Image (cartoon, helix red, strand yellow):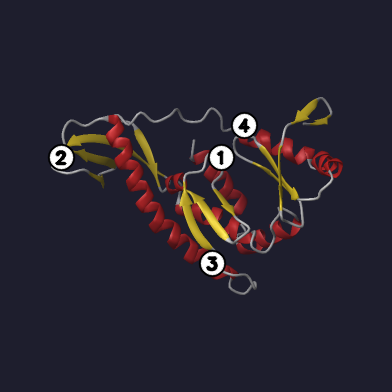
Amino acid sequence: MVPYGSKLIRYQLIRCARKTMEIAVHPDGTVIVKAPLQSDITLIKKKIVKRARWILGQQHYFKQFNPKTPLRCYVNGETHLYLGRKYRLRLVDGKENSVRLMRGRFLVAMQGEPTSEAARKLLDNWYREKARLHFSESMDRCWKKFRGFDVEEPTLLIRRMRSRWGSLSENGTVTLNTDLIRAPKECIDYVVTHELCHLKYPDHGSGFYKLLDSVLPDWEKLKHKLEIGMV
């Protein structure tokens, strides 16, 4: 913990093979500090104090979106998001298991008596298939803006993440949260673009935001749309 005025900033420190220090605030309010392996803890804490106003501001920003939507129960009439639109769930008997979008509804057909758990598994599988399709298309769209920046095109990985929409690994892999398929396409593009900017600038310094502003001038509006639309 680092004291700042009357507040205490709790953070998680990750030491890794990197040249600069990065401070990130996740949507759940968690502060993650990534620092070079040999960084002095005193210098790390000084950097946190220097960024304290920004850290607290980010935590306050994310806090306004709480409480989040309650956990889904996968029952008839419940709404579920897909590409930024809400669809009501309808569970029906069927000759085979399937998920279809029909007339503003998720029509989930199941062999035998429909159950919430079976509906959850079917819908999760459906979301994963759609995520693979739309995230790949988003990467193709966004990568075109980075071809002249002397960086290698990253590989794409899709998995469920607890507190992040996306990340970039040191080996050049962009990971996107499966749940991002619930967001509008332009918001998916924002997350992809954000991670691609990290290919050039690993931290969130001035260079990073200058690049993000140049390739996606309305990124702040899209970030806000993403956060308020996914609650």
Q: Is residue 125 left or right of residue 51?
A: left
Quarter of the figure with residue 198: bottom right
Separation (CA) of disc 2 from disc 4: 42 Å
What secondary structure is found at the residue carrying circle 2? Answer: loop
Q: Amino acid at mark 1?
A: Ser
Q: Residue at x 49, y 62 (%)?
A: 139
The residue at which mark 3 appears reads as 143
The residue at which mark 4 appears reads as 63
Separation (CA) of disc 3 from disc 1: 24 Å
Q: Position of residue 79 (x, y in %)?
A: 35, 34
What secondary structure is found at the residue carrying circle 1? Answer: loop
User: Sequence-wise, which precedes: disc 4 or disc 1?
Assistant: 4
Separation (CA) of disc 3 from disc 2: 41 Å
User: Sequence-wise, which precedes: disc 2 or disc 4?
Assistant: 4
Q: Is residue 185 above or below residue 43?
A: below
The residue at which mark 1 appears reads as 163
Separation (CA) of disc 4 from disc 3: 32 Å
Q: Amino acid at mark 3?
A: Trp
The residue at which mark 2 appears reads as 94
Tell which tag, 3 or 1, sits nearer the viewer.
1
